[in-house]
Amino acid sequence: MKKFLAFLFVCLLIAGGVAFWGYSKFKELDLPKADKTEVVIYEVKPGATLRSLGEDLEKQGLLRSAKVFEFWGRYLEVGHLIKAGHYELSASMAPREMLGLIVAGRTATQKLTFPEGLTLEQCAKIVHKHKIGTEQEFLKLTKHNGKKYGKIFPADMEGYFLPDTYTLPLSCDVPHLVSTAAARFEELALPYHTKESPLSLHDTIILASLVEREAQVPQERPIIAGVYINRLNDGMKLECDATVQFALGKQKEYLLYKDLEIDSPYNTYKYAGLPVGPICNPGLESIKAACRPKKSDYYYYVRNDVKGDGSHVFGRNYSEHQQNIRKYQR
């Protein structure tokens, strides 16, 4: 009996030793592979399994052990939640931390900024530069297929591609970008257009695009919008320089009299009313100004070259406008 107890004790010691060694080994393999390493972009491909993913992460030098990675996936019962995409991973991450990132789908992102006042053609160049897609892909969707993104959008989305800084997946493509921008317009811009707005939504966006290109001082946006509303209500031509520049297809510091004669539906010196479409993509402040123009007696404005800060001087009639031109233009 004593020999049996002694044998049992030795077995328990051995088993305890093995268990302790196994636990210690597990803890060692469960640690990050390195204390500090650079972040790398790793692609989890569609159809990746817990085992195949762990083995590849180990092969790429990001994990100490694929088996520990697989253990956590099975223990936490999340192996089926692996999401494909590009992830920012580092060998300084523990297996469980890395798994949690991939299961949660926290993919790597990129920021893309579209400034106010750009045309869709100019936006297309930014899309191409950041390798989201080609200019042709972008223009095919935004110039011809806008209606697929919602009933408020015309086929040509000029004016509706909301300027903003977009946080996008690293693997973002053109359809995802355009749908994101359309959703952003509906979320942020559309609520400004209410029953109290003086124009339809599309005409409001056209007006906002004029305001965007004409106003340089933020507080003048509602005033300039109000000037155009006054002229529209009285049947006057808008005579907006920015529309002529759009018709010319280029920016000019000074327009010549011959420029004002260009035969284009965008030439508001030649044709009354709003141009046939937006001349750029206006920002939120210009859209807000077009939705809520400031009521005034102003029908004219001229750039204040005396101050030289981009501000304007406003006139109530043509005579006052002429005086302002002589006084403030250089």
Image: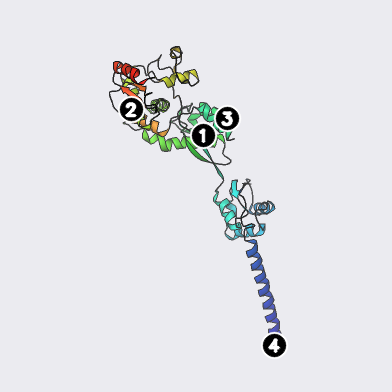
Q: Quadrant of the N terminus?
A: bottom right
Q: Earlier in the sequence, mark 3 or mark 2?
A: 3
Say which of marks 3 and 2 sits in front: 2
- Element marked by disc 1: helix
Q: Label 2: which residue?
A: 223
Q: CA distance from mark 1 to mark 4?
A: 81 Å
Say which of marks 2 and 1 sits in front: 2
| Image location (x, y in percent) of residue 219 | 35, 32
Q: Earlier in the sequence, mark 1 or mark 4?
A: 4
Q: CA distance from mark 3 to mark 4?
A: 85 Å
- Element marked by disc 4: helix
| Image location (x, y in percent) of residue 317 | 29, 18
Q: Earlier in the sequence, mark 3 or mark 1?
A: 3
Q: Determine which of the numbered discs, if any, sits on residue 137 in the image.
A: 3
Determine whether, in the image, residue 40 is placed left or right of residue 320: right
Q: Check if mark 1's residue and mark 4's residue have beta carbons within 8 Å.
A: no
The answer to whether residue 328 is visible is yes
Q: Count neighbours of disc 2 (C-alpha within 10 A) and say few if under 14, some if 14 to 19, many if 20 or more.
A: many
What amino acid does circle 2 point to?
Ile
| Image location (x, y in percent) of residue 35 | 62, 57
